[in-house]
Image (cartoon, helix red, strand yellow):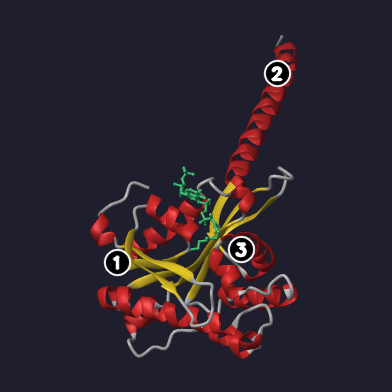
Amino acid sequence: MGIKLGQRRKPQNLSTLICYGRALCIMHQLFFTTLAANTLRPGVPSDIDGVVDVVLAAMPLDPQWDWRFPYRHEYPEDNYKYTKMLFEYFLDPEWDDWTVMVIEATSNEDPDVSKIVAFSVWDISYIRVLKNPEYEPQNPMREVSKRGGATRRDANPERMKAFRESGDEVMETYFNPLYGPRQIHLQILGTHPDYQRHGHGSTLCRWGMDKAREDDVALTLIASPMGKLLYTHLEFRLAGSGVIEIPGDPETNSWDAMDWDPNMHGKLEL
Ligand SMILES: CC(C)(COP(=O)(O)OP(=O)(O)OC[C@H]1O[C@@H](n2cnc3c(N)ncnc32)[C@H](O)[C@@H]1OP(=O)(O)O)[C@@H](O)C(=O)NCCC(=O)NCCS
């Protein structure tokens, strides 16, 4: 009897165990698939190709990109080379006044593959400047300029200069008088066109809003027309708007200075 029961019970236990095992396996797979389907994480140097692919697909939707790089179709190699060089600095752990956050999601083409679909680059030099006001923040854009970026053939040099100067002026006019060094600055943000309107841009901004709240600093940025739609959706404040005009150049470039101050918004429901 005992043996019979044992014989009957053993296979039952085994099949039950197998069932539990399979169920656990499926749950485990589902759990990690869900995570892989939408993961927010810091970028690392090995992400360079994935990030640059998204930058080069997303940024031309911002009119400012073609305005600065009107010859990118004639010199795609320069557009690629200097974009990649800049993002290598952003992703380099030694250049830690800057941080990149990326979103990895399941590829539309292959559900077994996850890839970077959105990125954001943050200037977090305030962390050091608040400890030491004399600290000179790292400037990757200057390094790229020194390493050939100043004569890149895809760019219009006058517009590049005007863009830089306008950025400095916006900081001096709208943000520095209000916040001083207490600002996390969103340098650049993009979602691959095939993955837009899925909340990735919002997730990346909310990372910055969390950081701003944690460190009691403001979040500042200069928005593109598409970016403005996103930041308005997130209830950022429009601090000021303007147009870059260069004498003799018929094309102009518009900008919007926007910010988000945790002290003015209180606790957000994220
Ligand atoms: C701006 C950008 C990053 C937004 O990324 P995203 O992942 O599509 O953003 P989200 O899905 O989080 O959008 C959130 C909300 O912002 C608003 N929004 C974003 N893009 C919009 C668009 N093209 N048209 C209208 N509203 C838009 C909507 O309210 C949207 O919510 P909804 O989809 O529920 O209507 C993306 O359009 C992009 O890469 N643009 C080109 C590069 C660029 O301009 N970058 C910004 C530099 S400042």
At 36% from the left and 82% from the top, the residue drawn is 129
Between the C-alphas of marks 2 and 3, the distance is: 62 Å
Whether the residues at callouts 3 and 1 have beta carbons within 8 Å, the answer is: no
- The residue shown at (60%, 84%) is 144
Instruction: Choose the circle earlier in sequence order: 2 or 3.
Output: 2
Is 242 situated above or below 8? below
175 vs 158, left or right, is left
| Residue contact between numbered discs 2 and 3, judged by CB atoms under 8 Å | no
Residue 115 is left or right of residue 191, and the answer is right
Does mark 2 have its CB less than 8 Å from ligand 1? no
User: Closer to us: mark 3 or mark 1?
Assistant: 3
Does the numbered disc 3 mark a residue whose Cβ is under 8 Å from ligand 1? yes
Q: Is residue 33 above or below residue 267?
A: above
Label placed on residue 60: 3
Amino acid, disc 2? Gln
Numbered disc in front, either 2 or 3: 3
Q: Secondary structure at mark 3?
A: helix
* Residue pointed to by mark 2: 12
Please state which amino acid type lies under the numbered disc 1.
Asp
Nearer the observer: mark 2 or 1; the answer is 1
Question: Disc 2 to disc 1, how far (Cα)?
Answer: 59 Å
Percent x, y of residue 190: 55, 60
- Across and down, in percent, residue 178 comes to 26, 73
SS for dot 1: loop
Q: Dot 1, how many residues are within 10 Å of its Cα: few (below 14), some (14-19), or many (20+)? A: some
Identify the residue shown where x is 58% and y is 72%.
91
Residue 212: x and y in percent read 35, 64
Residue 198 occupies quadrant: top right
Give the alpha-carbon distance from disc 3 to disc 1, as whole Å.
34 Å
The dot on residue 216 is: 1
- Disc 3 marks a residue whose amino acid type is Pro
